[in-house]
Image (cartoon, rainbow, N blue to C red):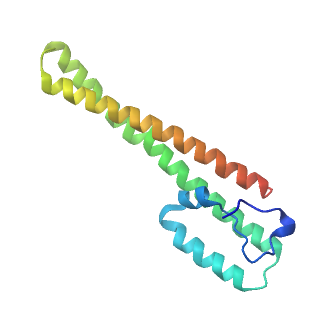
C-alpha cells in the first residue's frame, strides 16, 4: 500500500489516500473506509472528489488518534496518578508493607506504559497530519 499519491495520479485504480499506519488509526471505522474506497474505485470519480474523500478519512483518523491520546494523557492517566499518590502516602506511614510496594510498582509501570503509548500516538498523529498536508489541507 502506498502513501498519498500526487494529485496527477489519483485516477489510478489502486489509489489509496491512507497508508497502512493511517488505516490502523481508523480502528473500527476501517470497514466503512474500505467500502467507500471500493465504491470510488469502481466509478468514474473526479480527482477533486477523490481528494475530498481522502482528506475526510485522514481527518477521521486524526480525530480517533486525538481521542486515544486524550485517554492516555487525560482521564485515565489522572486516575492512575491519583491511585499512585494514595499508595505512596500510605507507604509513608507503613514503609514495610510489601503489598503496597508491589501495588506502587504496578501503578508506576502502568503510568510509564501510558506515557509511552501517548508518545507513540503523537508519532502517529504527526504522520497523519503530514499526509493530510500533502493533500492540501
Report which quarter residue 32 is drawn in: bottom right
Q: 60 or 107, which lies in front? A: 107
**Which quadrant of the structure image shows residue 44?**
bottom right
Count the marks: how many? 0
Which sits in the foreground, 49 or 130?
130
Left or right: 10 with respect to 118?
A: right
The residue positioned 52% from the left and 73% from the top of the image is 31
Horizontal side of residue 110 vs 18, given as left or right: left
Q: Residue at position x 78%, y 80% from top?
A: 45
Q: Residue at x 61, y 57 (%)?
A: 22
Spot occupied by residue 80 in the image (x, y as percentages of width and height)? 32, 34
Residue sticking out furthest to the right: 8
6 displayed left or right of 122: right
Q: Is residue 16 above or below residue 38?
A: above
Which part of the image, by quadrant, shows the C terminus? bottom right
Side of 134 relative to 40 (left or right): right
Q: Position of residue 75 (x, y in %)?
A: 40, 41
Residue at image position (74%, 61%) is 4
Q: Is residue 46 above or below residue 108?
A: below
Work out which quarter of the rendered image holds the N terminus and state it: bottom right
Q: Quadrant of residue 55?
A: bottom right
- Residue found farthest to the bottom: 43
Residue 34: horizontal and vertical position, in percent?
Answer: 59, 74
Amino acid at each position: 500500500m502506498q502513501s498519498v499519491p500526487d494529485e496527477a495520479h489519483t485516477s489510478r485504480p489502486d489509489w489509496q489516500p491512507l497508508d497502512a499506519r493511517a488505516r490502523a488509526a481508523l480502528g473500527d471505522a476501517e470497514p466503512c473506509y474500505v467500502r467507500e474506497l471500493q465504491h470510488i474505485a469502481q466509478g468514474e470519480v473526479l480527482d477533486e472528489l477523490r481528494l475530498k474523500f481522502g482528506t475526510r478519512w485522514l481527518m477521521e483518523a486524526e480525530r480517533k488518534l486525538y481521542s486515544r491520546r486524550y485517554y492516555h494523557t487525560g482521564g485515565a492517566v489522572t486516575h492512575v496518578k491519583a491511585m499512585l499518590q494514595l499508595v505512596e502516602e500510605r507507604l509513608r506511614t507503613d514503609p514495610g508493607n510489601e503489598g503496597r510496594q508491589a501495588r506502587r510498582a504496578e501503578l508506576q509501570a502502568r503510568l510509564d506504559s501510558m506515557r509511552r503509548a501517548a508518545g507513540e500516538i503523537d508519532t502517529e498523529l504527526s504522520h497523519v497530519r503530514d499526509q493530510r498536508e500533502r493533500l492540501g489541507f
